[in-house]
């Protein structure tokens, strides 16, 4: 009913918008369901990486404005159920602790871009059409784009699209660094899964520490990131996975990581 399909595949959690007839319009119900899926990924030690995608020809056309207008007029995001993790990462103290890879195609507007910005690696089909359209709809982007878009693509590029609300292409998104891979339409999910599987094959504690430390440096500054390095490293080096990596190196084989 929320228009979301969630599938476990090995160590991955695939989260797909499933409201193709409405171009995967993002309802308040979908926001809550998405937050619960992020919570499942965050909590389950067997899950190592998420993949967010859209079913059908489009990723998401963005906010279902008739639903969201009265909600946003309250001046905050909707309340979330217990066990949820806020998917836009607006509270740095309780962000998703595991990587998220996004596959976008077709219409990918407003929240589509902001969910990509809150994620870590992004793939786009060559037919993807991006847009932070809020200023054309009487308000402004309030899911993180005003903070993160210029960090990702540079001030001028961000202001070009943020202040005008104009669409931009997959080619532009790739050239600016918002998107890491551009593939043929229909190949975006497989490409995103391949990236996620590569992440899931690595040592989970090392991956999560890398993500956490990079975010620390980005939000709190380089020195805070440097100060946190060796305390985090000592904790990871005490893990079973670190011992397994040393054994595997000595035995000339691939390590078998357990996340412990």
Image (cartoon, rainbow, N blue to C red):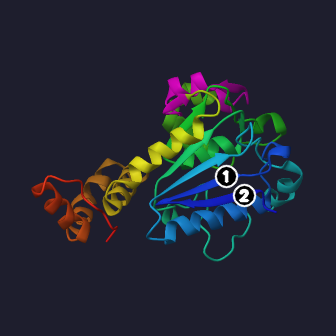
Res 254 quadrant in image: bottom left
Tell me the residue at 75%/59% (across/down).
Answer: 30
- Is residue 121 on the magenta stretch? no
Tell me the residue at 58%/36% (across/down).
Answer: 188
Where residue 23 appears, as percent x and y from the top left, is 80, 42
Magenta stretch?
160-182
Residue 49, relative to residue 260: is it above or below?
above
Q: Indicate the secondary structure of the residue bearing disc 2.
A: strand
Q: Quadrant of the N terminus?
A: bottom right
Question: How many other residues sit within 10 Å of disc 1, few (<14), some (14-19) or many (≥20)?
Answer: many
**Whether label 1 touches label 2, CB < 8 Å:** yes
Where residue 253 appears, as percent x and y from the top left, is 19, 54
Tell me the residue at 57%/45% (across/down).
Answer: 102
Q: In which quarter of the image is the C terminus?
A: bottom left
Task: Work out whether residue 144 or residue 194 is closer to the camera in this orientation and state it.
Answer: 194
Q: According to the image, label 1 marks what residue?
A: 16
Question: How many other residues sit within 10 Å of disc 2, few (<14), some (14-19) or many (≥20)?
Answer: many
- Lateral position of residue 7 relative to residue 254, left or right: right
Tell me the residue at 82%/57% (across/down).
Answer: 73
- Lateral position of residue 189 relative to residue 258, left or right: right
Task: Work out whether residue 145 or residue 249 is closer to the camera in this orientation and state it.
Answer: 249
| Residue 89 in view here | no
In the rendering, which numbered label is found on residue 173? none
Where residue 41 appears, as percent x and y from the top left, is 53, 65
Res 187 quadrant in image: top right
Q: Indicate the secondary structure of the residue bearing disc 1.
A: strand
In the rendering, which numbered label is found on residue 4? 2
Task: Work out whether residue 36 or residue 89 is closer to the camera in this orientation and state it.
Answer: 36
Residue 16, relative to residue 170: is it above or below?
below
């Amino acid at each position: 009913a929320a228009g979301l399909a969630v599938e476990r595949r090995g160590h991955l959690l695939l989260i797909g918008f499933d409201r193709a007839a409405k171009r995967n319009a993002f309802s308040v119900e979908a926001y809550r369901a998405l937050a619960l899926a992020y919570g499942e990924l965050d909590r389950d030690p067997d899950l190592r990486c998420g993949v967010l995608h859209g079913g059908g020809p489009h990723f998401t056309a963005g906010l279902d404005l008739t639903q969201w207008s009265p909600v946003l007029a309250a001046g905050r995001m909707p309340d979330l159920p217990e066990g949820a993790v806020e998917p836009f990462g607006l509270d740095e103290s309780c962000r998703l602790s595991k990587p998220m890879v996004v596959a976008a195609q077709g219409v990918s507007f407003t929240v589509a871009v902001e969910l990509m910005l809150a994620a870590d690696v992004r793939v786009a089909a060559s037919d993807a059409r991006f847009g932070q359209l809020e200023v054309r709809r009487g308000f402004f982007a309030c899911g993180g784009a005003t903070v993160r878009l210029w960090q990702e693509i540079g001030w001028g590029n961000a202001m070009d699209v943020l202040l005008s609300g104009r669409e931009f292409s997959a080619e532009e998104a790739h050239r600016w660094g918002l998107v890491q891979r551009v593939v043929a339409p229909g190949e975006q999910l497989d490409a995103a899964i391949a990236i996620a599987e590569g992440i899931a094959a690595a040592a989970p504690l090392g991956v999560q520490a890398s993500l956490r430390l990079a975010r620390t440096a980005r939000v709190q500054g380089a020195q805070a990131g440097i100060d946190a390095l060796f305390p985090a490293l000592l904790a990871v080096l005490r893990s079973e996975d670190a011992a397994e990596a040393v054994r595997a190196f000595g035995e000339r084989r691939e390590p078998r990581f357990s996340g412990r």
